């Protein structure tokens, strides 16, 4: 249910469970984590999904069994955040719950029209994964993070673009090609060059 295409330079990970809105099980989360960790040498990594939903978050039965509290979510986000290359979420549709964490951990986010973002932890009585609120606030600001995490708002594609949660809105037929085009420069560079530029962007100025 997790498809991996890795040529050593570009790695594409596809969540392929469209009949269940690409909801994630323990096994799928572990597969994603391992795939991201194994792709550490790739200069770019793209996350996407099949069907009309990127991911509905935790599978219902798995959530009841405790997946919502699993450290696997944080393992996946951390692996994406420390990847030395360019990471892109190519959102083929709505992203919800814990699945939003992996999206926030990527460097860039592109989305098709109609994509919504929401994280209903307040309603469900769970805490978000530890790093998700800080990443959300860093991208959209504290008030907007509270709109999502505390007021339970579903954010439209247009608002996500205005808030900085999405970097570009893309026609569905062009989604993967656009994501690939964004990786062309970094894939043509040396790993050291890509790592150095990413490090400079991440540095904190005095």
Image: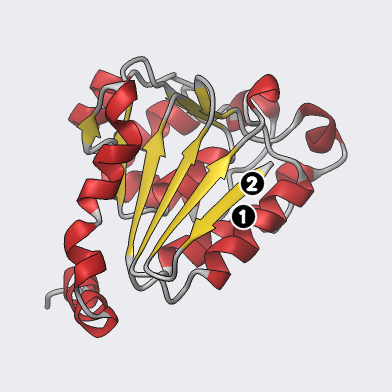
What residue is disc 1 on?
Answer: 32
Rendered view: 113 above or below 148? above
The image shows residue 189, relative to residue 60, as above or below, that is below
Q: Quadrant of residue 202?
A: bottom left
Q: Are marks 1 and 2 in contact (CB under 8 Å)?
A: yes
Measured as percent of width and height from the top left, residue 117 is found at 43, 27
The residue furthest right is 65
Please rate how many residues cluster around mark 2, counting C-alpha atoms within 10 Å: few if below 14, some from 14 to 19, many from 20: some
Q: Residue furthest front?
A: 7
Q: Return the x and y of residue 114 as percentages of the image width and height.
A: 36, 15
Measured Cα–Cα span from mark 1 to mark 2: 7 Å
Q: Is residue 19 above or below residue 9?
A: above
Q: Position of residue 104 (x, y in %)?
A: 41, 47
Q: Position of residue 200 (x, y in %)?
A: 17, 76
Residue drawn 35% across the image and 73% down it = 84
The correct choice, above or below, for 124 with respect to 47 in the image is above
- Residue at x 29% of width, y 48% of height: 180
View extreme (top): residue: 114
Image quadrant containing the C terminus: bottom left
Q: Nearer the viewer, residue 109 or 8?
A: 8
What element does badge 1 sit on? helix
Can you tell which of label 1 and label 2 is closer to the viewer?
2
Is residue 165 in view? Answer: no
The residue depicted at 44 percent of the width and 19 percent of the height is 153
Q: Residue furthest left?
A: 206
- Is residue 152 in sight in this rendering? yes
Q: Is residue 113 left or right of residue 104?
A: left
Which sits earlier in the primary sequence, circle 1 or circle 2? 2
Element at badge 2? strand
Residue 2: numbered disc: 2
Q: How many marks?
A: 2
Q: Crowding at label 1, few (<14), some or many (≥20) Cα neighbours within 10 Å? A: many
């Amino acid at each position: 249910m997790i498809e991996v295409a890795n040529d050593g330079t570009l790695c594409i990970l596809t969540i392929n469970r469209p009949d269940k809105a690409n909801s994630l099980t323990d096994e799928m989360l572990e597969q994603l984590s391992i795939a991201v960790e194994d792709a550490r040498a790739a200069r770019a990594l793209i996350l996407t999904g099949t069907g009309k939903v990127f991911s509905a978050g935790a599978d219902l039965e798995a959530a009841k069994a405790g997946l919502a509290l699993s450290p696997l979510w944080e393992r996946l986000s951390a692996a994406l955040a420390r990847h030395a290359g360019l990471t892109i979420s190519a959102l083929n549709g709505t992203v919800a719950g814990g699945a939003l964490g992996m999206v926030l951990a990527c460097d860039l986010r592109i989305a098709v029209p109609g994509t919504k973002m929401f994280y209903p932890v307040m309603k469900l009585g769970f805490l978000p994964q530890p790093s998700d609120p800080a990443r959300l606030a860093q991208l959209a600001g504290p008030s907007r993070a509270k709109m999502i995490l505390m007021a339970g708002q579903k954010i439209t594609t247009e608002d996500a673009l205005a808030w900085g949660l999405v970097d570009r809105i893309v026609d569905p037929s062009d989604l993967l090609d656009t994501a690939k085009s964004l990786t062309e420069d970094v894939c043509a560079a040396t790993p050291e060059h890509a790592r150095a530029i990413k490090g400079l962007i991440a540095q904190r100025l005095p």
